[in-house]
Amino acid sequence: GIQVEQSPPDLILQEGANSTLRCNFSDSVNNLQWFHQNPWGQLINLFYIPSGTKQNGRLSATTVATERYSLLYISSSQTTDSGVYFCAVSDNQGGKLIFGQGTELSVKP
Amino acid sequence: GAVVSQHPSRVICKSGTSVKIECRSLDFQATTMFWYRQFPKQSLMLMATSNEGSKATYEQGVEKDKFLINHASLTLSTLTVTSAHPEDSSFYICSARALGQNTEAFFGQGTRLTVV
């Protein structure tokens, strides 16, 4: 099955700093999503981005499908950005999402 | 975005009893829903794919007789953990996608199950 690798596994930032999270996947995909899991476990949809670039406020994402990676950019980080960020991809069979191991982000005041 | 509602959010049950978790898509129809399990400090692991009107498809290593899935309508899927044991304690979370394969998936709030 398809493999999803995220890096770095952990990241500690000072408030106001920028960061880039990476997601590599092993095969072609027809769906890629980024999520933020809050402390209560809720998965917040950040981006649905099988290809191209999108921006939403301080967050933006780019997926280069031909090279099998996606990047999530967080600018001017805030303490409320802390949590785990997951990348998940859907292969071409059944539409199920396969998750990476996540990046745990901690933003210090 | 679309709303997926999951209940209960937290449940404590005695070992040997069964627990039912509901997952509803509130503002869209979903022919397919997905059930995941997440242990502390780990990623989400897909347990099964729930198909409306047909049997669920389970991932390798997931006991279908222990984790019963029913998808009775286009907006409701249920997961029943039968004869629960302490090792079944985990965070269970469902997902739904609108009709059509290449659509965005939305997740419920999750259910934290503790078996004592």
Image: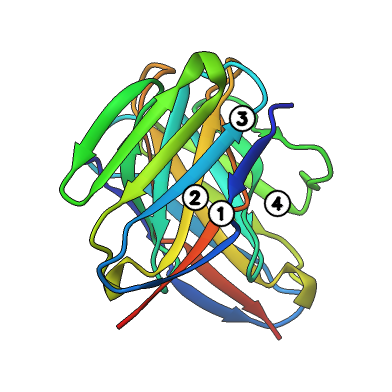
Dot 2 and dot 3 within a common chain: yes
Spatial CA distance of label 2 from label 3 is: 13 Å
In terms of secondary structure, where does tag 3 sit?
Answer: strand
Q: Chain of mark 4?
A: B
Identify the residue under disc 3: A25
Are circles 1 and 2 on residues that touch, CB within 8 Å?
A: yes
Query: Where's the C terminus of chain A, which quadrant?
Result: bottom left
Q: In the rendered view, would you say A79 is above or below A60? A: below
- Please report the residue visible at 36 percent of the width from the left and 28 percent of the height from the top: A49
Where residue B26 is drawn, which disc sits there?
Answer: none
* Count of marks, rendered view: 4
Circle 4: residue type? Phe
Q: Is residue B31 visible?
A: no
Residues flagged by tags 3 and 4 on a common chain: no
Disc number placed over residue A86 in the picture, else none: 2
The outermost residue toward the right is B61
